[in-house]
Amino acid sequence: MTPVIYGFEKIHFLLKISAVSICLIFSFSVYAGKTYPKDDVIILQGFNWESYANPKGWYNAVNSVTSEISAAGFNYIWLPPPNLGYNGEGIYPHSRGYIPLEYYNLNTSYGTYLELKKLVDNLKSKKVYALADVVINHRGKHAGTPENPIFMNPDWGLWAFTGGDGLIGQGAQDTGEATNYAYDLDLTNQYILNYLKDWMKWLITDVGFAGFRFDFAKGFSGRFIGEINQHTMPIYSIGEYWTDMDWSCPGKKICYNQDAHRTSIINWINSIWPSYIDVSNAPDAFDFTTKGILQTAIKENEYWRLIDQQQKAPGLIGIMPEKAITFIDNHDTGSTQNHWPFGDKNQIMQGYAYILTHPGTPCVFWDHFFDWGLKDDIKKLTLLRKQQAIKSTSTLYIKEASYGLYAAYIDNKIAVKIGQRSWHPDLNIWRLYHSGNDWAVWIKK
């Protein structure tokens, strides 16, 4: 029997006992083997900042377009936080699930537990696999005062949260950057960490998720992700390690050299590896360095930014492409929050012409694909990436990166140019595949 609410500790206990009894049999058969090579995937972010308010229920809305998602070549879809949080009601009405309340209660503003299961199963039948957005850095209170909060399902006390934060707990010192809008979980407390491990294992074995996107990964030590992934064995996982770029140069623009920024992402990835037996299964990371450089280059016509001093791509894809998740915008940078938007439609399509042909693993934003009238252009590029077998580790040769023009070859299979200046490869060898305003892509004849 499927309970309506999964927030009660008694139900949690029964589910945990059942999960343990079948874990050895089914934990590795939910997804038999690797669904796709990790270096040959395309991801869709399957929501935006307002998805929680969809009148149909967001899970139902996504379920109605699963065939389109599959046909466009997406292998994974990143879904919003699955568990109950402040989703449009309560003390923090605008969190959309990013301040968790309960863990095993999957009835949220996005839809019900059963609607989520139906969506995940339907996607899986079309060979598209769901990633859960998990928030393990912090938790919100149900009631009470900041000094005397009340938590329910589970009813932890201040012992479960770090000391020294804006909302002070009684546990150990925080292992990362503190938040001031919720209570930071003390992940050094083995009871808390084990609870989260079991919950995330349940998201895989019961709900059917293939893996995770770790929210606010700078809020805690990377080693905890290593421990969690060793326990849960996700097929795929991604970390959001978002820090400020270097803005210290004159002109109110980011500096040309962002090596320190991308190195900070690499250091975060490396902080996870000591916890790992199988390094290849360590999480990937969003390439915020590439996003910042690429959108500045396109907006300012300064395409010289797109090559570093070693003649490589200047973002994470230039050093560790196998771990780099490239993207144009997400629910934070774009959507209705617009914290760091990429640009207008033409600029965004230049961006997709870049990330969908280049090394790294591209992630397409829901709004751009379904709401901005860019679906046909983006789909042309996603299918091209599949047809030409472009991988995260494909070879990039930058032909030109100057004012008004960027041109490059990828694996000697694709030629691409972005920028206002004209350029084309040898047309005796190459033919135009697709183009738009200030961008074009060619393939071999």
Image (cartoon, grey):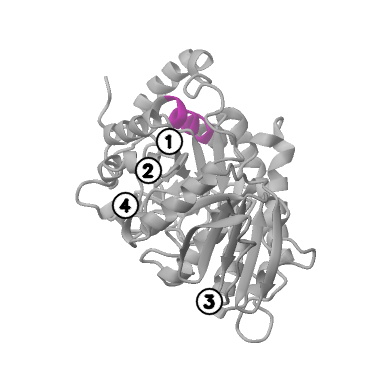
Distance from label 2 to label 1 (Cα)?
8 Å
* Residue depicted at 71% across the width and 46% down the height: 271
Task: Identify the amino acid type marked 1.
Answer: Val
- Residue identified by numbered label 1: 128
Residue 170, position in %: x, y?
A: 56, 49
**Extent of the magenta region:** 196-205
Label 2 Cα crowd, 10 Å radius (few <14 / some 14-19 / many 20+): many
Give the label, 2 or 4, closer to the camera: 2
Asked if the magenta segment contains residue 201, the reply would be yes
- Residue identified by numbered label 4: 87
The extreme right residue here reads: 310
* Residue depicted at 58% across the width and 41% down the height: 389
Task: Identify the amino acid type marked 3.
Answer: Lys
- Residue identified by numbered label 2: 69
Q: Main secondary structure of the magenta part?
A: helix
Q: Are marks 4 and 3 in contact (CB under 8 Å)?
A: no
Distance from label 2 to label 4 (Cα)?
26 Å
Q: Is residue 6 above or below residue 283?
A: above
Lower sequence index among marks 2 and 3: 2
Lower sequence index among marks 2 and 4: 2
Task: Identify the amino acid type marked 4.
Answer: Asn
